[in-house]
Image (cartoon, helix red, strand yellow):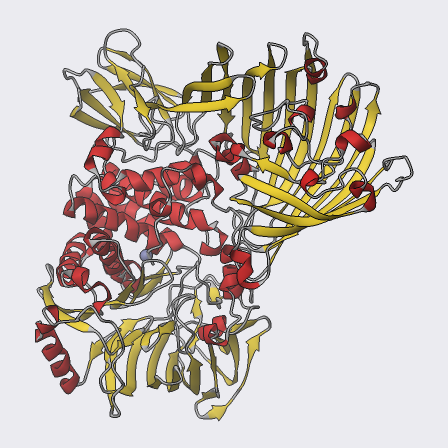
């Protein structure tokens, strides 16, 4: 499979990539524990005969299957496991549904009948005798067949069953139909693999592929005569071959008027039966469409001289791109045959169809491709899927357990192929059209090969990596793409660069020859590489694939022809040292890995600079320490580039971005300044963001700045520790400024289960801020100091996300403790739900006369924010003087009505806030009802003594940035203070949500 590229879906101009959800999958590959047996290699043989007919009115298959099962193991089998994978779509309790629920929320579940799919009408017989069988509890897509008579070593049994498949609408995963276009995959009952390590019954999943027994297939498909079918194997009907040939010979569609129309012609009343056969394969898929255009070609294989027939089938939908696709297919078959060994089958078919599981999906001898952005992406996805004929179809690894063995190696070959096909292709060509803009952003030189590296670095620099060699369901959705595909591709091409193409290729040729049509594992791959290279490759197979040990070499010193290199990472792996003259590489030398420091001799040459890995073939975590000049001062200094607006950062140079900024507050007036920061896409050890302003009304400086130091220890309870320093200065009334300085320590804890992580963070802040009370009196201000401690536990994701924050805040005159619990009960749909907030707080000590240190029953306006939180254009305005005086930040008691000044602050309070999307289509409007309830220690006195408050109303707003709250219905004690609705309307301006720093904190929160 080829997943949609994470980076391609990133909005590169926005920092919102930080918000990609982390909480994804929660699965167990349940089922019986495989019995380990230390047998010699064997594989079962499974030969299928299937007769199937398609009912395209009811979207159903009716079929009869006969399986010849040959037990080549030395064990006597009393039962067999069979997969009934269409049942993955049968309800909301299946493993597939649970996985989709985690990654996509309730919108993806099988609620509607047309989304449901299932297999039934089963009646298993063995050697014509009825047998006992049952589906596994909670796993309707796996069943267990109890044999009346055990099948001994070397024995053969015949298993037969009729079956009926309801085909789901093809919007969920790999099996489905869109109208009368059919994608028939994972559709028939098939035995689970029994191998050296026992049985492998696995449920159908979207993230996570398959493992099946090899054998022969003889499949007859009956359907209306005007369907064109692409399938695994070779077509046996002479008349159908003639029909396909005439379709392939017909080019007239290219010029026919209206060829872009895409409706289905009526199905023929006549039926035909097409027969496909193939040997030594482990799966059979077919695709039927009445609209297919057909291209036919031939490739002569380099080793055997054998001819392969190639077919391309596609609809009008992207015919403009697909008319060239045969060329891509033929070129890919030839290229991979040269690199790996001859293509294994007699024919290969590439079909275009609606596809929801990634951008392409492989089956033996056939692949299905979804919509492509342009000819480059079509070529790329065809290359990837074509390569799976080797790494998946022919080399039958357990894709569920070892996804890197098919996806990682395939991705490495795909990258190699694309580099060869499109040398000099640049990254910007994937994202930008306007070359002037590209040059302005200094992106014109960055090669397209940087994309997988950047995808991986975004995860790695936050210590969110997972080892490459993990089972598919264990990965977070992001890591399944960035680790199994991108990082694994980088690593296998790193191994190739180290060994050299010729040794790598001859090793892979032998690997393919040895393991063709067999089941194999990582050890088999390793032993063949070690025997061919004569090297101990444990650094690659154990450390690089099996752990998250990091690769980070540093150049320390240079003298004559020797270079002092320090290994700052955990990985002890080979490094490539290049002698540079300007931008040209003069010499290259591979050195084997080492621990600590080492002097390495370098070939003589006239170098200006020495570099580790200038072409980015190694998965280096930090590249700023990879270069050293041979003479002069500041030898290790790195190139710095100033960039207006934005750029995609180059991992081996320092980038400083700046953007003009304006601001306004009542006291400062209009301000003009600059926001300067060191990048947004790739997390760095030191990050800064400064935004100084010149204020015109009161000629002075104002602004904000933050510097953060991020530490990412290896294999530690702490995933990331961030030490930050912040400073703020803006004007205050009385011709003075307010100041705030903050030092913080944030500890983010590691989560072991990345597929559905619990996020934990602890923090400490020391804050010194101008005394707000003195500003308001007004009086010359002094600084007050505060400390905050907190612990946060939460879960992101689309379904029922929550977080709970316990915090303690104090200065010398008070101490307060609180718990803040936020929970979203998700409705059907991705972002809709009931937001629940529960808050409880109590003052542990309060000896000051300053009122606002205690808990505020309602949202705080700027005059109550003694820590100067939030962006308040008119921070010191008294309510309700002007529009901006209605601004507040919702916290603590959570009431909207402005009651703090009247009822006073509380020693303790408990509050409950509810807000929800409107039901049905009204939910699309940016309007939500809210209900707030509050109980505090004192009520409001004067006959309105109830300590219980409530209010209800509507809020309307834009993206959580600007919201207006209108409390319509309030309890009597609130009404007695603010009689009119107008007197209760308040606004929230959350400009911080634009700030990348805040966003980043949200990510790790
Ligand atoms: Zn793939």
Please state which of residues 285 and 708 is positioned toward the viewer in this rendering.
708
User: In the picture, which quadrant includes the C terminus?
Assistant: top right
The residue located at (48%, 9%) in the rendering is 699
| Rendered view: 579 above or below 179 | above
Residue 875 visible in the displayed image: yes
The residue located at (46%, 75%) in the rendering is 114
Report x, y in % for residue 444.
21, 33
Report x, y in % for residue 924.
51, 56
Residue 461, located in which quarter of the rendered image?
A: top left
The residue located at (28%, 38%) in the rendering is 450
| Rendered view: 631 above or below 374 | above
Please state which of residues 473 and 916 is positioned toward the viewer in this rendering.
916
The residue located at (35%, 37%) in the rendering is 454
Report x, y in % for residue 883.
60, 32
Please state which of residues 572 and 152 is positioned toward the viewer in this rendering.
572
Q: Is residue 9 left or right of residue 446?
A: right
| Rendered view: 940 above or below 353 | above
| Rendered view: 595 above or below 171 | above
Residue 677 visible in the displayed image: no
Report x, y in % for residue 202.
48, 66
Q: How many marks?
A: 0
Q: Is residue 100 left or right of residue 221?
A: right
Hey, which residue is sitting farthest right in the picture?
943
Ligand 1 - quadrant of the structure image: bottom left
């Amino acid at each position: 499979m080829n997943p949609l590229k994470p980076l391609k879906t990133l909005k590169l101009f926005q920092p919102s990539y930080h918000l990609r959800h982390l909480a994804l999958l929660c699965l167990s590959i349940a089922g019986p524990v495989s019995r380990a047996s230390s047998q010699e290699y064997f594989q079962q043989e499974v030969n299928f005969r299937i007769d199937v007919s398609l009912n395209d009115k009811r979207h159903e298959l009716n079929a009869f299957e006969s399986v010849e099962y040959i037990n080549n193991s030395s064990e006597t089998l009393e039962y067999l496991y069979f997969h009934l994978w269409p049942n993955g779509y049968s309800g909301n309790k299946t493993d597939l549904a649970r996985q989709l629920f985690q990654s996509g929320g309730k919108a993806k579940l099988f609620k509607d009948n047309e989304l449901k799919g299932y297999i039934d009408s089963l009646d298993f017989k063995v050697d014509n005798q009825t047998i006992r069988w049952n589906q596994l509890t909670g796993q309707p897509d796996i069943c267990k067949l109890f044999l009346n008579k055990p099948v001994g070593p070397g024995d053969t049994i015949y298993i037969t069953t009729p079956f009926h498949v309801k085909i789901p609408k093809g919007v969920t995963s790999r099996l489905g139909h869109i109208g009368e276009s059919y994608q028939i995959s994972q559709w028939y009952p098939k035995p689970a693999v029994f191998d050296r390590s026992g049985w492998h019954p696995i449920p159908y999943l979207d993230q996570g592929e398959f493992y099946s027994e090899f054998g022969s297939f003889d499949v007859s498909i009956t359907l209306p005569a005007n369907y064109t079918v692409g399938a695994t194997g070779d077509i046996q009907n002479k008349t159908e071959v003639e029909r396909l040939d005439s379709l392939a010979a017909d080019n007239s569609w290219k010029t026919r008027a209206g060829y872009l129309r895409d409706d289905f012609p009526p199905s023929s009343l006549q039926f035909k039966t097409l027969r496909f056969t193939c040997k030594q394969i482990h799966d059979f898929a077919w695709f039927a469409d009445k609209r297919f255009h057909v291209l036919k070609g031939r490739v002569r294989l380099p080793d055997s001289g054998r001819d392969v027939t190639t077919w391309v089938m596609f609809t009008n939908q992207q015919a403009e791109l697909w008319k060239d696709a045969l060329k891509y297919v033929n070129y890919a078959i030839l290229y991979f045959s040269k690199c790996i060994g001859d293509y294994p089958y007699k024919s290969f078919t590439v079909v275009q169809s609606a596809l929801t599981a990634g951008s392409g999906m492989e089956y033996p001898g056939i692949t299905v491709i979804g919509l492509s952005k342009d000819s480059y992406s079509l070529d790329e996805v065809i290359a990837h899927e074509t390569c799976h004929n080797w790494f998946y179809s022919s080399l039958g690894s357990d894709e569920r357990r070892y996804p890197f063995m098919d996806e990682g190696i395939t991705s490495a070959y795909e990258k190699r192929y694309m580099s060869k096909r499109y040398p000099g292709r640049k990254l910007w060509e994937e994202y930008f059209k306007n070359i002037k803009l590209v040059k302005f952003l200094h992106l014109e030189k960055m090669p397209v090969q940087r994309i997988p590296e950047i995808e991986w670095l975004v995860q790695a620099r936050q210590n969110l990596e997972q080892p490459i060699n993990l089972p598919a369901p264990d990965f977070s959705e992001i890591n399944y793409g960035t680790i199994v595909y991108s990082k694994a591709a980088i690593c296998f091409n790193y191994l190739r660069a180290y060994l050299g193409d010729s040794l790598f290729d001859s090793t892979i040729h032998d690997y393919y020859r040895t393991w063709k049509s067999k089941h194999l594992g990582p050890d088999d791959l390793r032993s063949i590489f070690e025997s061919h290279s004569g090297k101990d490759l444990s650094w690659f197979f154990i450390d690089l694939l099996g752990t998250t040990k990091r690769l980070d070499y540093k150049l320390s010193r240079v003298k004559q022809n020797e270079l002092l290199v320090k290994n700052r990472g955990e990985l002890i792996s080979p490094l490539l040292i290049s002698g540079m003259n300007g931008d040209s590489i003069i010499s290259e030398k591979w050195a084997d890995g080492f621990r600590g420091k080492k002097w390495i001799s370098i070939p003589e040459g006239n170098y200006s600079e020495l570099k580790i890995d200038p072409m980015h073939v190694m998965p280096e975590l930090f590249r700023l320490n990879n270069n050293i000049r041979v003479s002069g001062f500041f030898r290790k200094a790195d190139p710095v580039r100033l960039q207006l607006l934005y750029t995609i950062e180059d991992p081996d140079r320092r980038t400083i971005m700046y953007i003009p900024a304006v601001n306004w507050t009542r006291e400062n007036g209009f301000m003009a300044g600059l926001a300067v920061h060191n990048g947004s896409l790739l997390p760095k050890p030191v990050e800064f963001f400064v935004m100084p302003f010149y204020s015109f009304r009161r000629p002075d400086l104002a602004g904000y700045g933050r510097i953060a130091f991020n530490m990412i220890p290896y294999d530690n309870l702490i995933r990331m520790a961030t030490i930050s320093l912040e400073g703020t200065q803006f004007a205050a009334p009385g011709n003075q400024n307010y100041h705030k300085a903050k030092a913080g320590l944030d500890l983010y804890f590691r989560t072991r289960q990345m597929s559905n992580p619990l996020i934990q963070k602890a923090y400490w802040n020391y804050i010194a801020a101008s005394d707000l009370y003195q500003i308001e009196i007004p009086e010359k201000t002094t600084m007050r100091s505060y400390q905050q401690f907190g612990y946060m536990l939460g879960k992101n994701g689309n379904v029922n996300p929550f977080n709970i924050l316990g915090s303690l805040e104090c200065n010398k005159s008070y101490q307060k403790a609180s718990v803040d619990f936020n929970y979203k009960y998700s409705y059907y749909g991705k972002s809709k739900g009931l937001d629940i907030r529960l808050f409880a707080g109590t003052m542990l000590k309060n000896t000051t006369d300053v009122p606002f240190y205690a808990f505020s029953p309602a949202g705080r306006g700027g005059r109550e924010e003694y820590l100067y939180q939030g962006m308040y254009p008119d921070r010191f305005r008294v309510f309700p003087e002007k529009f901006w005086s209605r601004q507040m930040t919702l916290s603590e008691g959570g009431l909207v009505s402005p009651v703090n000044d009247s009822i006073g602050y509380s020693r303790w309070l408990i509050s409950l806030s509810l807000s929800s999307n409107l039901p049905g289509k009204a939910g699309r409007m940016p309007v939500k009802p809210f209900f707030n309830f509050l109980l505090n220690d004192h009520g409001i006195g004067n006959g309105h003594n109830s300590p219980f408050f409530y209010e209800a109303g509507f809020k309307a707003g834009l993206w959580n940035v600007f919201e207006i709250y209108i409390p319509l219905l309030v309890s009597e004690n609130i009404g007695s203070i603010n009689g009119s609705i107008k007197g209760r309307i308040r606004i929230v301006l959350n400009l911080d949500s634009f700030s990348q720093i805040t966003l980043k904190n949200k990510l790790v929160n």
